[in-house]
Amino acid sequence: MRPPWALDENAFLDACTACGACVERCPERVLVHGAGGRPVFDPMRGECTFCGECERACTPRALDRSATDEPWTLKALVADACLPRHGVVCSSCRDACPERAIAFPLTARVPVPTIDDARCTGCGACVSVCPTRAIALSARAGMTA
Ligand code: SF4
Ligand code: SF4
Ligand code: SF4
């Protein structure tokens, strides 16, 4: 997963010089050096606040908010390891979500989480708090992250 406002992957690879400026500038420390030294967003380290520091630091414009409407198309997905799906009460992800995108409809004895894609920004705040690592971020079909 690239930083927010990354160009399409091929254009990103062409433009990014692996200078590391975005990684150094990120106040949340959620960017790390990936393959070839190029930046990757790691939600296990925390939440992207979309502060824009990484984009502003990118001199070669591999991150460019003028080239895209949205920072990315990532959304949270809940997998089968989610505790309520196995009868265990948990709502840590809901408590962490700044967008109130996670709901627990009262349709089961132990309510299970549902993600509202329209609200989810893919910030990743829910990922590291999940005790079973049941949440991943994924680009939505037909979109690129
Ligand atoms: S927008 Fe801000 S918090 Fe998000 S990756 Fe860039 S510098 Fe870090
Ligand atoms: S924090 Fe994880 S285990 Fe708990 S409800 Fe959310 S997705 Fe399920
Ligand atoms: S990725 Fe962010 S906005 Fe989306 S459900 Fe998780 S915490 Fe909420």
Image (cartoon, rainbow, N blue to C red):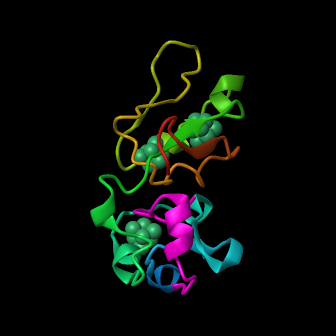
Q: Dividing the image into 4 quarters, which one contains the N terminus?
A: bottom right
Tell me which residue sits at (56%, 37%) in the image.
77
Majority secondary structure of magenta residues: loop
Decide whether residue 33 is among the magenta residues: no
The answer to whether residue 141 of the structure is visible from this angle is yes
Query: In the image, 121: left or right of 81?
Result: left
Along the line of sight, the residue nearer the viewer: 11 or 28: 11
Q: Quadrant of residue 67?
A: bottom left
Decide whether residue 11 is among the magenta residues: yes
Where residue 80 sits: x, y (%)? 70, 30
Tell me which residue sits at (45%, 77%) in the image.
26
Eyeballing the image, is 55 above or below 99?
Answer: below
The answer to whether residue 2 of the structure is visible from this angle is no
Tell me which residue sits at (39%, 76%) in the image.
61
Tell me which residue sits at (54%, 87%) in the image.
19
Q: In which quarter of the image is residue 109?
A: top right
- Stretch in magenta: 1-20
Along the line of sight, the residue nearer the viewer: 36 or 22: 36
Where residue 30 sits: x, y (%)? 53, 69
Eyeballing the image, is 5 above or below 16?
Answer: above
Where residue 95 sits: x, y (%)? 45, 45
Q: In which quarter of the image is residue 2?
A: bottom right
Eyeballing the image, is 36 above or below 68?
Answer: below
Q: How many discs mark residues in the rendered view?
A: 0
Query: In the image, 47: left or right of 65?
Result: right
Where residue 34 sits: x, y (%)? 66, 72
Query: In the image, 112: left or right of 36?
Result: left
